[in-house]
Image: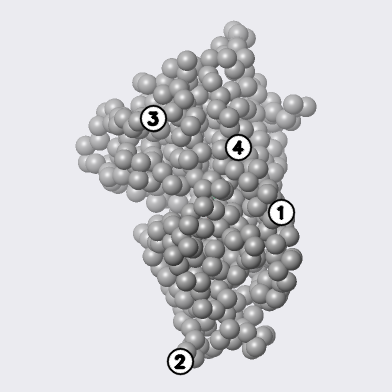
Amino acid sequence: MGRLIVVSNRAPSVDGSSDSGGLVVALIEALAKNGGLWIGCAPEQSDTPTEDLVFHQRPDFDIGLFELEPELYRDYYLGYSNSVLWPALHGRVDLIDVQPRYAKAYREVAKRLAALIAKTARDDDLIWVHDYQMIPLAHELKELNVKCRIGFFLHIPLPDLQTFKAIPDWKDLAKWLSDYDLIGFQTRRDLGHMINIFRHTMRGELRANGTMGIAGREVALGSFPISIDVSGFRRLAAKGAENTEPAPLPRLIGVDRLDYSKGLPQRLAGYEAFLARHPEFRSKVALLQIAPPTRDDVDAYKAIRSELEHLSGHINGRFGTVEWTPVQYIHRAMPRNELAVLFRFSRVGLVTPLFDGMNLVAKEYVAAQDETDPGVLILSQFAGAAEEMTEALIINPHDPEDIARAIKTALEMPLAERIGRHSALYAHLDQHNVGRWSAAFLKQLLSVQRLSPDGVAPFPGSTPWTQTA
Ligand code: GDG
């Protein structure tokens, strides 16, 4: 019976302390079922990396860590992954920092990782690769004659063809993607971009069953919107609220890694426009923005940090009084349970990315609400979540006046309308939680029939591997 092998840049912690994030919760059951393995980078780099994965056993699944030299890790992770692919795939080609050594390190890491995985993978295992740091992995595994079915899920957006072609290695990236058996995207938007990219760059042909014929093989594609543990997050928020005082003023909340894709300056510009247009709300509301640091060593992240500090200081200087601070800005991570309560006690959730694969904060905000007196979600049309969460107030983050109007509408929205919108959003999330997301992806990966060169399917049906609910 085959195992599920999950590969991502970071593995969950060996002691289970980082499990509360959605991905581990989503996969734990599937991993536990058949003796699963999660492979990721070791938290510390090493000048003398081990030649094998370093295995750790948890009660539910095994973890295999791979070590990298500090310089190789920097060039692969901060370099190619986060200074080339992250900006490019988020449509910020102006921020790409092209360095030949970054691309070299990216390929080198995939090659090394493939060699380590090839030592442990068996033909009937399923390999599920996560995210943009790992795109060449299927290609490298196939070079080593690994025969497992290999799926890939892209957590971040895939831009349109023209933007994709701005990446110097776009042809390689398209080829590497086509080496997977199944590619999953957050949205139909991104799926459409992939189909277009394959059509134009690899003469891909869309088949009636939704797969694409590319260079003599068949690649399955699908949109699988990721979610959260909806009822778990709701319980966390409700429990925490029992011992917490509500906010003194109606609060607007934003929670985002401090990243230029999240539209934070645009959010503050919208809030400033709102306060400028509606003096009657001054001293009557407050914006709490939590923006923990991330990828601090990349210049573009230093720039967004000082921009945000400048803007929040500017708004506080312009409108603040001795008694009232319009913007509270926290540049630190908060514990997850505290975050859940802050969401619950906030009248408005502000999620304004310029481009986002999904955006889990939008889903967490809705899950955390008190259904008898829920807050209102303001959501960017460019977040993947906007495809599903149509009862939110959908805005254009580039238009401060649009954000300002939505803030006013949200603050003045009657209870009955708030309840109506929230219950529709919650019902959708509850039915499409993160367990359903992983089950849907794995089900499709299992149904892939990979033909060996002699035309024989080595994996008849989906019998060898048991699927979780
Ligand atoms: C990528 C894609 C896609 C944030 N601040 C704190 C904190 N967080 C948590 C949030 C949420 C998570 O981090 C952020 O998830 P997002 O989905 O909003 O964004 P990315 O980190 O960019 O994630 C995204 C996601 O992958 C999943 O596929 O949705 O589009 O970009 O859970 O609550 N958590 C704690 N303290 C904080 O201060 N504990």
Q: Which amino acid is tagged 3?
A: Phe
The kind of residue on which mark 1 rests is Ala
Residue 271 lies, with reference to residue 303, above or below; the image says below
Q: Nearer the viewer, residue 308 or 175?
A: 308
Q: Earlier in the sequence, mark 1 or mark 2?
A: 2
Instruction: Find residue 206 and report its horizontal and vertical position in percent.
Output: 74, 30
Q: Secondary structure at mark 3?
A: loop
Residue 5 location, x and y as percent? 45, 28
Q: Which mark is residue 254?
A: none
Label 4 element class: helix
- The answer to whether the residues at label 1 and label 2 have Cβ atoms under 8 Å apart is no
Q: Residues within 10 Å of mark 2 (few under 14, many from 20)?
A: few
Queried on whether the Cβ of the residue with tag 1 lies below 8 angstroms from ligand 1, the answer reads no
Which amino acid type corresponds to the residue marked 2 in the rendered image?
Val
Q: Kindly report the distance in space between the C-alpha atoms of the residues bearing marks 4 and 2.
A: 50 Å
Q: Nearer the viewer, mark 3 or mark 1?
A: 1
* Whether residue 377 can be seen here: no
Q: Are marks 4 and 3 in contact (CB under 8 Å)?
A: no
Check disc 2 and report its element: helix, strand or loop: loop
Residue that label 1 marks: 424
269 or 437: nearer the viewer:
437
According to the picture, the residue beneath numbered tag 3 turns out to be 61
Question: Residue tagged by mark 4?
Answer: 436
Residue type, label 4: Arg
Q: Residue lying farthest right?
A: 208
Residue carrying label 2: 322
Q: Using the numbered discs, state the Cα–Cα distance from disc 3 to disc 1 in whole angstroms.
A: 36 Å
